[in-house]
Amino acid sequence: MIDYGLADKVALVTGVNNPQGIGAATALAFAREGAKLVLVYKKVFRPFDEGRTGRNGVDRYYKANAGNADFVERKLREMNADYIILESDISDEDAVREIYSEAVNRYGRVDILVNNAAVDDENGLDTIEKITRKVIDDTFAVNVRGSLLMTREFIRRRSDYGRIINISTDASQVFAGQITYGASKATLEALTRSIALEVAKYGITVNCVAPGPTQTGWIDAELEEAVISIIPMGELILPEDITDTILFLAGGKARMVTGQVIKVSGGHAL
């Protein structure tokens, strides 16, 4: 078993309310390593058919993201983990300050930040012919501004240990059909490299994990068949595949790894 050296480290993870999501999986992975957790989520309401939520697909995914973090909290209680869970909006500057104040009041510091929270457009408007100002503003508000605000506050309140891990997508550089979402993630990758250079003097690393098609509840059986055909390794990525990489980047063994965008995609979108 790998010891990542994360026992008693304080990890802040955003976007944790989907039981099948990368955020929830990351929280549980850190808890298994003995880390203390500050978990943040925001409910995102989209119409869904309750009768279709019993199987993977957009209805299950939309329901999950409209809910709270009960699932991850129940699992953490079973593990006797040390955690706090906050419902908040990372796109709001005052809310970000409050998140960190809660974390510091409880644990004295934050050692690791995982910028996982993100939004996209569900109405088919994220193309150059249909794009609206609202889609642009809403997407960049969370995916870029929110991640930047969380990162800035992390640097301002830095401890003697620092790891920042951003979550992108492997298709960020070319994402036809989701141009604003892709552009926001490409921006996050650029920020990863720039900020890594700025904060290296503090001993803080900044890296980015770019997942390929990952089963977080949104890929139904029909889409799974289509997607697997374009993944060279022949299977969907699982949230645990992403968390394995996050744990490495968060640990002491990755102290000289910074400014990197690591695709965990099974060869998809190389």
Image (cartoon, grey):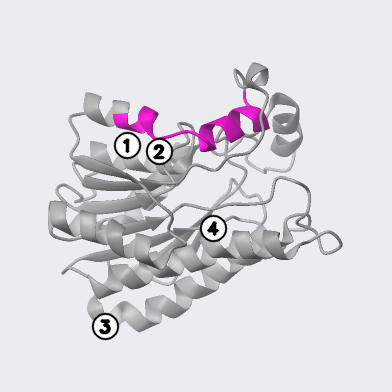
Examine the structure image and report whether residue 157 is included in the region drawn in magenta.
no
Residue topped by disc 1: 28
Main SS class of the magenta portion in the image: helix
The range drawn in magenta is: 56-73
Residue type for callout 4: Ser
Q: Residue furthest front?
A: 94
- Local SS, label 2: helix
Whether label 1 touches label 2, CB < 8 Å: yes
Residue topped by disc 3: 201
> Disc 3 or disc 2, which is closer to the eye?
2
Residue type for callout 1: Leu
| Coordinates of residue 81 in the picture (x, y in percent) | 20, 35
| Coordinates of residue 112 in the picture (x, y in percent) | 28, 58
- Local SS, label 3: helix
Please name the residue shown 48% across and 38% down the image: 21
Residue 40 visible in the picture:
yes
Q: On the image, which quarter does residue 180 sit in?
A: bottom right
Residue type for callout 2: Ala
- Local SS, label 4: loop
| 107 sits left or right of 180 in the view | left
> Disc 2 or disc 4, which is closer to the eye?
2
Residue topped by disc 4: 168
Compared with residue 23, is residue 81 higher up or lower down, i.e. above or below? above
User: Within 10 angstroms of label 1, few (less than 14), some, or many (20 or more) residues?
Assistant: many
